Amino acid sequence: MKKILVLCFIFLCTYTLLADEPAEEQPQKFTLEQAHEIFAIDFFNKTWDFLDMPERVYEENEVMLNLAHASLLHWSIVGAPINMQRGEWMVAHVYTILGRKEPALHHAQNCLNITEKFGFDDFDLAFAYEEYARALALNDDDRWEEYYDLAKGAGELIQDQGDRDYFLQVLDEGPWFEKR
């Protein structure tokens, strides 16, 4: 009887030890296109994480800028025009926040060109005008007021009430470089 109890105890201990071992995870495999999309989305979202920081040091600003460019690069390989438009908006926005005049205007113009070429409207049109207006204001270009008005008008036409309210709130926030 003791032998049976000992054998049962050993069996239980062995079973418990083996059952608690995690199964070895196999690395997940993605196609190249899937990997590009994953990186594009992840880098875009991480750019927002940096933008949401109350303060950033120089190195964090550089990482934020690199993330925005990396997202745009990956979208340029596998994205649709709307992804390119939003990626250009993000890069322009980061440059604008950082006060880098020429690249802010360059990427804001790219965003606006894509928007017009593909006839994007609603939310995307409003934000294209908004970022172009900010980049113009940063560059001391008086046309910023015209594009601010276009942004406001397009924003008021955004169909979804939540998106409209969000856009109009963002439009009122800085930076406007003491132009408003």
Image (cartoon, rainbow, N blue to C red):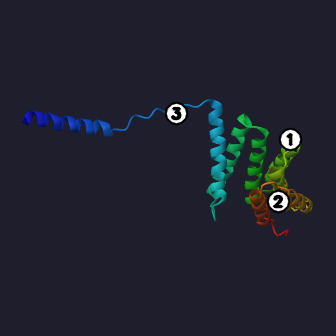
Residue 53 visible here = yes
Quarter of the image for the N terminus: give it.
top left
Q: Which residue is mark 3?
A: 28
Decide: is 75 above or below 89.
Answer: above
Q: Amino acid at mark 2?
A: Arg
Instruction: Name the residue nearer the viewer: 173 or 98.
Output: 173
Which residue is at 68% across, 43% downward?
70
Q: Position of residue 178 (x, y in %)?
A: 82, 70
Q: Amino acid at mark 3?
A: Gln
Q: Position of residue 58 (x, y in %)?
A: 64, 58
Indicate which disc, 2 or 1, sits on the residue closer to the N terminus. Answer: 1
Image mark for residue 70: none
Instruction: Name the residue nearer the viewer: 22 or 16.
Output: 16
Q: Which residue is mark 1?
A: 118
Pointer 3 local density, CA inside 10 Å: few below 14, some 14–19, many at least 20: few
**CA–CA distance between discs 3 and 1?**
36 Å
Q: Which residue is mark 2?
A: 134
Pointer 1 local density, CA inside 10 Å: few below 14, some 14–19, many at least 20: few
**CA–CA distance between discs 2 and 3?**
42 Å
Which residue is at 64% across, 46% downward?
43
Which residue is at 17% across, 38% downward?
9
Q: Quadrant of residue 76?
A: top right
Identity of the residue furthest to the front in this view: 1
Secondary element type, mark 3: loop
Q: Is residue 87 shown left or right of residue 112?
A: left
Secondary element type, mark 2: helix
